[in-house]
Amino acid sequence: MDTHDPARTEKAKAALARMPKRTLHIFIASQVEGLSYVEIAKREGLFLWQVRRHMLRAIRIIVREMR
């Protein structure tokens, strides 16, 4: 797979742009900052199930946009 495929890059950008701000913030905390769901929940003052819900939403958006 070509990791420098401009079409995939644009699709990924579109997926991130479609995410609600809170979902994007949680997604970045997990995937870029490397925080666990528990750490994110504590930092954001959320329940663990809320972090999981945001991550599931983020993944669904990414999958839909990358098709």
Image (cartoon, rainbow, N blue to C red):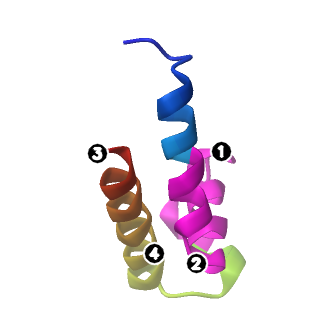
Q: Please state which of residues 53 and 34 is positioned toward the viewer in this rendering.
A: 53
Q: Can you tell which mark lies on residue 67?
A: 3
Dot 1: what SS?
loop
- Asked whether disc 2 touches disc 3, contact meaning CB atoms under 8 Å apart, the reply is no
Residue 6 to residue 40: above or below? above
For the stretch drawn in magenta, what is the main secondary structure?
helix
x 38%, y 82%: residue: 49
Q: Is residue 50 above or below residue 6?
A: below
Q: Which three-letter amino acid code belongs to the residue tagged 3?
A: Arg
In depth, the one of 16 and 5 nearer the eye is 5
The residue that disc 2 covers is 20
For the C terminus, the quadrant is top left
The mark nearer the N terminus, 2 or 3, is 2
Q: Residues within 10 Å of mark 3 (few under 14, many from 20)?
A: few
Residue 48, percent across and down? 44, 79
- The residue range painted magenta reads 13-40
Q: Amino acid at mark 4?
A: His
Q: Which mark is residue 54?
A: 4
Q: Nearer the viewer, mark 1 or mark 3?
A: 3
Q: Is residue 35 magenta?
A: yes
Query: In this rendering, does residue 39 appear at all?
Result: no
Secondary structure beneath label 3? loop
Q: Nearer the viewer, mark 2 or mark 4?
A: 2
